[in-house]
Image: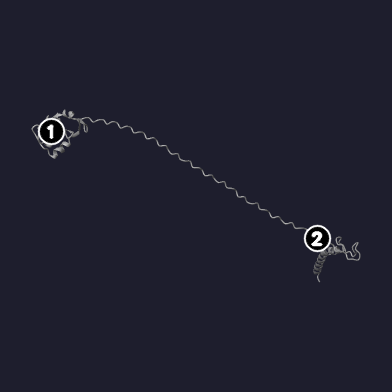
């Protein structure tokens, strides 16, 4: 065997022995020492009878902890009492009293003002009333008024248009009541003539107003 191999084997053997010594010192030796040292907490059983008891066997030891646990009374957990829910009282809202609407006082109706007295229409104006004496003042061809059935007519502008000529319009016809003459029941001077309906139509167009008195 060569020297190199011998050295290698020797080193391996040395390492192995060293490991075994370390393991023995750390684990095996302490365990054996501990087994040989008595444990002060463990007492050998006493074979002697209990003091004061003759010829009998020793009474078994009572486990104080177990008996105490057995005699303890379990206190029940009190059930919490739920406070009753109080419903708040609802205060009714008062109904507002409606305010009556005041009835408006009607304004007094003012008394109607008296109608003014009608202004009398002058004689000779349209609708104006004339007396027979006022009509009698207009008795010429150039100012001829005549009365027929209680009404007076101003026929001055018609004199020149009369079919029988203007000779019938004189102081005996103008300013007078010619009702009977026109109806043919009276003569006017020496003339009597019954007029046609057209004559009365023409006469109505010259009407002015009524005659009073």
Residue 47 is drawn in which quadrant?
Answer: bottom right
Name the spot of residue 35 as percent of width and height, x first.
85, 64
Can residue 124 be seen in the rendering of this structure?
no
Residue at image position (15%, 38%) is 200
Q: Nearer the viewer, residue 105 or 80?
A: 105
Name the spot of residue 92 as percent of width and height, x first.
55, 46
Left or right of 147 in this view: 39 = right
Secondary structure of residue under mark 1: helix
Residue 208 is drawn in which quadrant?
Answer: top left
Local crowd size for mark 2, using a 10 Å CA cut-off: few (<14), some (14–19), many (≥20) = few
* First in residue order: circle 1 vs circle 2: 2
Q: Nearer the viewer, residue 56 or 91?
A: 91
Name the spot of residue 16 as percent of width and height, x first.
81, 66
Q: Which residue is mark 1?
A: 159
Left or right of 9 in this view: 99 = left
Secondary structure of residue under mark 2: helix
Number of the front mark, 1 or 2: 1
Q: Nearer the viewer, residue 3 or 98?
A: 98
Q: Which residue is mark 2?
A: 67
Q: Residue furthest bottom?
A: 1
């Amino acid at each position: 065997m060569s020297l190199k191999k011998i050295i290698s084997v020797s080193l391996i053997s040395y390492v192995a022995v060293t490991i075994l010594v370390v393991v023995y010192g750390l684990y095996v030796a302490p365990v054996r020492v501990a087994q040989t040292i008595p444990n002060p907490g463990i007492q050998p059983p006493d074979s002697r009878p209990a003091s004061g008891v003759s010829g009998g066997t020793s009474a078994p030891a009572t486990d104080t902890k177990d008996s105490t646990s057995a005699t303890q009374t379990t206190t029940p957990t009190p059930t919490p009492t739920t406070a009753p829910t109080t419903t708040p009282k609802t205060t009714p809202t008062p109904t507002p009293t409606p305010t009556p609407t005041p009835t408006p006082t009607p304004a007094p109706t003012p008394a109607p003002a008296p109608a003014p007295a009608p202004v009398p229409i002058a004689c000779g104006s349209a609708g104006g009333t004339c007396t027979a004496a006022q009509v009698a003042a207009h008795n010429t061809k150039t100012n001829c008024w005549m009365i027929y059935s209680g009404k007076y007519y101003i026929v001055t502008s018609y004199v020149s248009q009369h079919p029988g000529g203007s000779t019938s319009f004189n102081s005996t016809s103008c300013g007078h009541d010619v009702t009977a003459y026109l109806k043919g029941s009276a003569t006017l001077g020496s003339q009597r003539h019954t007029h046609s309906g057209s004559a009365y139509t023409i006469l109505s167009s010259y009407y002015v107003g009524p005659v009073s008195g």
